[in-house]
Image (spheres, rainbow, N blue to C red):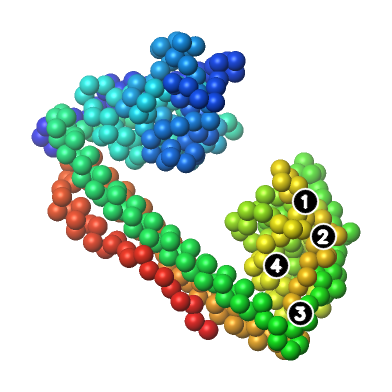
Amino acid sequence: MREGWEREILKKVTVFKSGKTVSKDIEKDSGAVIYAKVGDMNLKGNEVNITTSSRFVDLSDINGNQIIPIGSVIFPKRGGAIATNKKRKVIRPTIVDLNTMAIVPTAKLDSEYLYYWFQSIDLQELSNGTSIPQINNNSFDKVHITYPKSLVEQKKIVSLLDEAVEAIDQAKANIEKNIENAKELFQSKLNEIFSQKCEGWDERTLGEVCDNLDSKRVPITKSKRIAGEIPYYGASGIVDYVADYLFDEDLLLVSEDGANLLARTYPIAFSISGKNWVNNHAHVLRFSSQISQKFIEYYLNSIKLDDYVSGMAQPKLNQRMLNSIPVPFPTIDKQNKVLKVISSLDLYQKSIKELYVLKLQSLEELKKSIFQKAFAGDLTKNWVESGMQPVAEENVGYKLKY
C-alpha cells in the first residue's frame, strides 16, 4: 500500500441507498425532481449524468429522505439490467425506484473519484446469481476500496482519468465512425450495382423467381421442443436446437415480423443449408440456383421494405407483400459476375470491421489498465500520455475497391 493511501471496506466510506416506487398519481411529465428508473439510464443525455427522465415528481409530493444526494452514483439492483453494468452520476435532485440503488460517498471520498472507481466493479459478480439477479447492501460486505487520504490527491487522479477517458472515448468514436463509413460505402456500391438497367437486367417480383415454402413451416412452443442438434430458426436466426427437421436443402429465410424489419440493425434475409427446422416467424424461399439465392439475399438486405410492412407496433411482412417485392433478375451469368464483385466488397467491409473491433477491444483493455494504475497510486501524467499514444486515431474514410 502506498504511503498516504487507505484500503477500507467500501461500506465504511460510503452509504448505500435503495429506491422506492412512488404512486403514479404524483408522477408528472415535468417537475423539480427527476424520478429515475433503470430504463432512464438509456435516455439520450444520460450516458454519464442523470440529466433527464421519462417521469418527474414535485418536491412537495415526496419524503425528503427519498432524495439521492448529488454526487452519488446510481445503478440497477434487480433483473437482467445488472448485466449492463450501467452506472450514472446524480447531479440534480433525483429519486429512484425500487429496482435502482445509489452509492453515496462520505466525506472521505471525492464523488468523482468514487464514480471512476465504481466503473471497475462488475455488478454481475455481486448479484446473487438466481433466476432474477439481485443486489442488496450485503452484496458489498467483502468489497474493498483503495484511495488516497488526501482529497486533493483524489482530485489529481480524477483529472488524469478525465484526460485519459476523454482521449479513449474520442478514439473509440473515430473508430466507430470508420466502421460506419465502411458500411455506408458498401451500401452505396450495392445501390449502384442493383440500380443498373443494362440489357438482360429484367425486373420481376420475388414470387416469380423462387418458391415459397411457408406452408411447410411448423412452430413448436419451447415447452414442447425436444432438444437436439438441428438448428431451429426464427425471424433473425437460430433460436434453439431440436431433435428433428423439416428441411434439408439450401434455402433463403426472410424475417416475417419484428422491429428489425424497419430498424434494419441486422440482416432480414439470410441463407441456410442442411437439416433445419423453421418456425412461422421467417418466410422460407427456395431458388433454382444458389447464385440466384445469394443474389436476392444481398438485394433484399440492401433495400428498405417499409412500403411492404404493415403495423408499426408489431411490424409484419406477410407472404402476399413479400411475393410482390420487385427484384432485379439478370441472367445467371450476370448474377454470378455481380456476386463476385459484391462478395469482394463484402469481404473488404468485414475485414475493416474486424480490424476496428479489435482496436475497440484494445481501447477497453487500455482503459482497464489505466484504472488499475489509478487505484494503485501508479498513474502519472507521463504514463497517461505514453499510454495513449498507440490509440490516437484519425477519423478517416475508406474507399471500397473492386
Badge 4 local density, few (<14 within 10 Å), some, or many (20+)? some
Q: Earlier in the sequence, mark 2 or mark 1?
A: 1
Badge 1 local density, few (<14 within 10 Å), some, or many (20+)? some
Q: Residue extending furthest left?
A: 3
* Amino acid type of the residue tagged 4 in the rendering: Leu
Q: Position of residue 38 (x, y in %)?
A: 51, 32
Badge 2 local density, few (<14 within 10 Å), some, or many (20+)? some
Vertical side of 90 occupied by 245: above or below: below
**Image quadrant where one finds the N terminus:** top left
Residue 253: name its quadrant.
Answer: bottom right
Q: Earlier in the sequence, mark 2 or mark 3?
A: 2
Asked if disc 3 and disc 4 are in contact, CB closer than 8 Å, the reply is no
Q: Residue at x 38, y 60 (%)?
A: 174
Q: Earlier in the sequence, mark 2 or mark 4?
A: 4
Asked whether, in this view, residue 110 is left or right of residue 92, the answer is left
* Amino acid type of the residue tagged 2 in the rendering: Met
Q: Earlier in the sequence, mark 1 or mark 3?
A: 1
Q: Which mark is residue 321?
A: 2
* Amino acid type of the residue tagged 1 in the rendering: Ser
Asked if disc 2 and disc 1 are in contact, CB closer than 8 Å, the reply is yes
Query: On the image, numbered disc 3 is attached to which residue?
Result: 329
Q: Earlier in the sequence, mark 4 or mark 1?
A: 4
Query: On the image, numbered disc 1 is attached to which residue?
Result: 310
Badge 3 local density, few (<14 within 10 Å), some, or many (20+)? many
Asked if disc 1 and disc 3 are in contact, CB closer than 8 Å, the reply is no
Query: On the image, numbered disc 4 is attached to which residue?
Result: 300
